[in-house]
Image: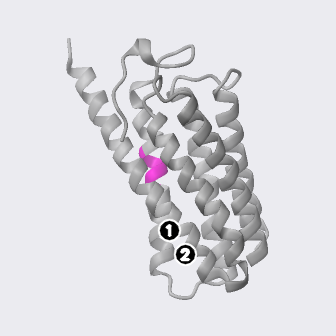
Amino acid sequence: MNQPLTRADTAGDTAQQADLWKPVLLRSLAALAFGALTVFWPSPSVQVMGWAGGLYLLATGLLLLWGIPKAGYTRDRMPGKILSAAGAALTGAGAAVVLLHGDRVFGVVAALGLGVAGAVELYCGIRYRTRHVLARDWIASGVIGLGTAAALPFFISLGAHALLGVAGGGAIISGVLWVLSGLTLRHDARGASRKP
């Protein structure tokens, strides 16, 4: 999905780090693990939904926060500030869902966290589409996050299995996106390190 950029093409005060692929690939693994759990758990309880969904949101938020400096941004300037807000929203939503189990809590709080993060990623992707290697991935991830957030509240009355299905479906789609991005970044970093 992403395309290689030169050091001069990156936005922000510093260029992206060569190991940007690490938080991207770990984010994909968290999403795919959560998605697999939602597919293969036949009848999850509200507690399983709270723990699984909460840990997924928490991990995604922390990995997003970890990836900001690796993407070449500082947290005290744009877009590091708004990406930090997205990571904080996901982390807070994850903590709330882990601690407060319930269909309505999951449907509303997870939707808020995913919606804020999706809107921020969509904004950053559009705003920096010609200046950052992750811009296309942010656009796709933002649309997936906003779509999942919009759908979750409509499935509250159907229970944990339906809510996990919606959240897990979005996680699988974004996980595939991020694994492709992470592997491409890793490949590009290896090629750049071999050049004299």
Residue 42 is tagged as none
Three-letter amino acid code of the residue under disc 2: Gly
Is residue 102 visible from the viewing direction of this image? no
Contact, mark 1 vs mark 2 (Cβ under 8 Å)? yes
Q: Is residue 189 left or right of residue 196?
A: right
Is residue 179 visible from the viewing direction of this image? yes
* Image x and y of residue 62, in percent: 61, 45
Quarter of the view holding residue 184: top left
Residues drawn in magenta? 25-29
Give the secondary structure at mark 2: helix
Residue 165 is tagged as 2
Q: Residues within 10 Å of mark 1 (few under 14, many from 20)?
A: many
* Image x and y of residue 133, in percent: 42, 30
Residue at (75% x, 62% y) in the render? 109
* Image x and y of residue 145, in percent: 59, 54
Q: Depth check: 194 or 175 in front?
A: 175
- The answer to whether residue 80 is above or below residue 105 is above
Q: Residues within 10 Å of mark 2 (few under 14, many from 20)?
A: some
Residue 169 is tagged as 1
Three-letter amino acid code of the residue under disc 1: Gly
Q: Depth check: 124 or 178 in front?
A: 124
Residue at (69% x, 33% y) in the render? 82
Residue at (78% x, 70% y) in the render? 105
Residue 26 lies in the magenta stretch: yes
Quarter of the view holding residue 6: top left
Q: Is residue 22 left or right of residue 155?
A: left
